[in-house]
Image (cartoon, helix red, strand yellow):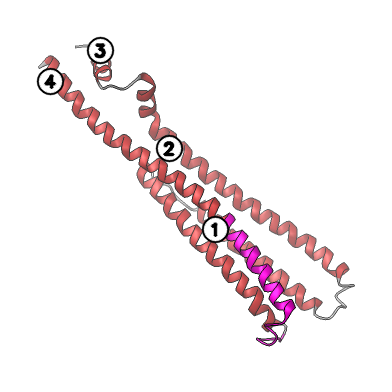
């Protein structure tokens, strides 16, 4: 029997429409492209964050002497050093995350590829949340020790106001970071579920095809 006629016969009897069959055939390539695009977008996001931070460092370096009248205000040199240290710490953090993405070698197997990305984004969410909370504590407490104030005056109105503003800002950052990561994680989980369903459906199709061939020609 002609091979093309045989394929046309089992596809017709498999119950799949032409559009469904086309999607089924193209699914691995589609998911491979989706994951590649996701990696590219993630790299660009980290590169954009690093660029903005470096630009802000330049602006702060130029503006700080003007704002402090050549660092003559009390505490201004120490404040500048602390600010630059925090900038460099944040840049280093996101540079390390960018290197993690750059050195990620994705598997050719679609499910393994999706699992790799899921693991990376879940770990990235945890590390970024930990870093943001640690940075808040560092600004509040390490900064006070840096200026020699220690734990004294923690209940002063200005300190409480600054701490409340820091908590609000940190909460907003955590919400934004979690939203960004959860969107990617949920998207990958959907892709993985769709691929597994396609695999199960493929097994069913193979079995039904052999059953149809057996019943028709044997």
Instruction: Please tell me which residue is depicted at 32% across the width and 34% down the height of the picture.
Output: 198
Q: Nearer the viewer, mark 3 or mark 4?
A: 4
Q: Is residue 151 magenta?
A: yes
Q: CA distance from mark 2 to mark 4?
A: 34 Å
Q: Which residue is depicted at the point 41% across and 51% down? A: 116
- How far across and down, in percent of the image, does residue 10 sit? 24, 19
Q: Residue 175 location, x and y as percent?
A: 57, 57
Location of the C terminus (image quadrant): top left
On screen, residue 61 above or below 215: below
Question: What residue is pinned by disc 3?
Answer: 5
Query: Residue 113: x and y, percent?
Result: 40, 46
Of mark 4 and mark 1, the one earlier in the sequence is: 1
State the mark number for residue 214: 4
Please, what secondary structure does the residue beneath circle 2 have? helix
Q: Nearer the viewer, mark 4 or mark 1?
A: 4
Q: Residue 129 occupies which quadrant of the picture?
A: bottom right
Q: Is residue 151 visible?
A: yes
Which of disc 2 and disc 3 is earlier in sequence? 3
The numbered mark at residue 50 is: none
SS assignment at label 3: helix
- For residue 9, what is the image quadrant? top left
Q: Which residues are magenta?
A: 148-176
Q: Which mark is residue 31?
A: 2
In the displayed structure, does residue 182 sit left or right of residue 62? left
Number of residues whose C-alpha sits closer than 10 Å to that of mark 4, classed few (under 14), some (14–19) or many (20 or more): few
Q: Residue at x 62, y 64 (%)?
A: 170
Q: CA distance from mark 2 to mark 1?
A: 24 Å
Mark 3 and mark 2: span between their CA atoms?
Answer: 30 Å
Look at the magenta stretch and give its main secondary structure.
helix
Tell me the distance, in whole angstroms, between the alpha carbons under discs 4 and 1.
Answer: 55 Å
């Amino acid at each position: 029997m002609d091979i093309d006629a045989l394929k046309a016969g089992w596809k017709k009897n498999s119950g799949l429409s032409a559009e469904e069959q086309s999607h089924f055939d193209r699914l691995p390539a589609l998911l491979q492209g989706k994951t590649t695009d996701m990696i590219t977008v993630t790299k660009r996001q980290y590169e954009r964050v690093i660029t903005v931070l470096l630009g802000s460092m330049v602006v702060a370096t130029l503006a700080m002497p003007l704002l402090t009248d050549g660092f003559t205000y009390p505490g201004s040199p120490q404040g500048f050093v602390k600010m630059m240290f925090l900038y460099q710490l944040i840049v280093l953090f996101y540079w390390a995350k960018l290197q993690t993405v750059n050195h990620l070698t994705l598997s050719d197997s679609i499910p393994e590829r999706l699992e790799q990305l899921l693991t990376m984004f879940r770990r990235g969410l945890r590390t970024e949340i930990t870093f943001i909370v640690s940075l808040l504590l560092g600004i509040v407490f390490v900064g006070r020790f840096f200026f020699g104030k220690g734990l004294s005056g923690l209940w002063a109105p200005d300190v409480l106001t600054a701490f409340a503003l820091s908590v609000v800002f940190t909460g907003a950052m955590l919400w934004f970071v979690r939203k960004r990561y959860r969107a990617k994680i949920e998207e990958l989980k959907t892709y993985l579920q769709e691929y597994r369903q396609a695999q199960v459906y493929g097994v069913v199709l193979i079995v039904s095809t052999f059953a149809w061939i057996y019943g028709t020609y044997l």
